[in-house]
Amino acid sequence: MKIELHELTVREVAENYVDNAEEGVSGYSGRLNIRPKYQREFVYDEKKRSAVMDTIRKSFPLNVMYWVKNEDGTFEVLDGQQRTISFCQYVIGDYSIENRAFHNLTNTEKEQILNYKLMIYFCEGNDKEKLDWFRIVNIAGERLTDQELRNAVYTGPWLSDAKLKFSKSNCAAYLLSKDYVNGSPIRQEIFETALRWISKGEIEQYMSVHQHDPNANELWMYFRNVIEWTGLTFTTCRKEMKGVDWGGLYDQFKDTMLDANQLEQEAQTLMMDDDVSNKKGIYPYVLTRNQKYLNIRAFTPGQKRAAYERQKGICPGQYCGGKHFEFDEMEADHITPWHEGGKTTAENCQMLCKECNRRKAGK
């Protein structure tokens, strides 16, 4: 990994500054992509923008910035986008501060701004080296998410196409999945979810393999299939559906014949069950039958103590032979198992030794 600290002036960075929808945002005589496609759509407010210029006008040090150096000798801003846009916009006359635009300044004041030295790290290396370094560096201001850091490394036509589908305000992925997927498209959270699903958690490996693909159609089609399967399988939309690992459930059950009406009836019943603490877990539970997803309400300390006293410390389990145990050596158990209709009530509570409880649960 090659990392070099450079001094560049505001004049150099603002040279040939361009900011429009067609050409993007660039500077440094066209060699610097100031708003790469992985950057969030975020703009400083007037107070923050003025603070940047106040720092420069007073010759105070501005926080160090980070550029990614590409193989063709061009650069992309990893950190410092808003600071860079702030001083570039001021220099070209897009806004004024205290009723003084750049063209209203004296030549001395103009030169002081244009000659201000910026401290910028140029970093280049292979994909893993860049990711490792970006994660270690304490990036100032609005910290980049893990997915934004990955986007900084795996740039290319595939990422550009994926961003159009997953990372814009009101993008297609957001509109399709807003009832099922948590997060903001701008902060790359929906994009990250889609990647995690299709890659089985190996996001960086998937991005590396597909970095130079001409488009992200495979990812988009997979994501659409997951969301459409979810809507067909669970026909009533509830707030608890957001954030479920739908990709994992789709992969496991997409080829299984499921009765949507039966699943809905069971989900409705479980939603009304006070013993089910994790309502979000209802959806994986009705498919997998794994009770861990439901986080069944635990017996209270009072219920456990009452059962222990009622049993006089004797374990009623069938594996230990009815031995006596101290309270701390026992665990609460449903006499009638929850999945057979047993409730988390005092009458349905018994205390088992740990061995009996473990072996009963494993039956």
Image (cartoon, rainbow, N blue to C red):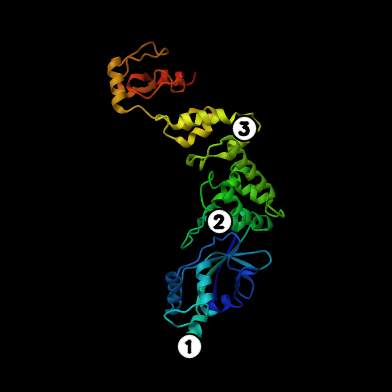
- Residue 104, image x, y percentages: 48, 86
> In percent of the image, x 53 and y 29: which residue is there?
286
Residue 305 vertical placement versus 223 (above, below): above
Of marks 3 and 1, which one's residue comes earlier in the chain? 1
Q: Quickly name the residue at label 1.
A: 108
Among numbered discs 1 and 2, the one appearing first in the sequence:
1
Q: Which residue is mark 3?
A: 253
Tell me how far mark 3 sits from mark 1, CA to CA: 71 Å
Q: Mark 3 to mark 2: distance in Å?
A: 31 Å
Residue 152, compared with residue 270, is above or below; it is below
Instruction: Using the image as rendered, state which of residue 122 and residue 218 is in the foreground.
Output: 218
Mark 3 Cα-neighbour bin, 10 Å: few <14, some 14–19, many ≥20 = few
Residue 127 in the image, given as x and y percentages of width and height: 62, 55
User: For mark 1, does the 10 Å Cα neighbourhood hold few (<14), some (14 to 19), or many (20 or more) residues?
Assistant: few
Nearest the viewer among 328 and 250 is 250
Closer to us: 69 or 155: 155
Residue 330 appears at what percent x and percent y? Answer: 35, 22
| Res. 71 mark | none
Q: Is residue 350 visible from the viewing direction of this image?
A: no
Numbered disc 3: secondary structure: helix
Question: At label 2, which amino acid type do we have?
Answer: Glu
Q: Nearer the viewer, mark 3 or mark 1?
A: 3
Q: How far apart are the two marked residues, 1 and 2, measured between alpha carbons?
A: 40 Å
The answer to whether residue 3 of the structure is visible from this angle is: yes
Q: Examine the rendered structure and indicate whether residue 292 appears above or below residue 147.
A: above
Few, some or many C-alpha atoms within 10 Å of disc 2 (few <14, some 14-19, many ≥20)? many
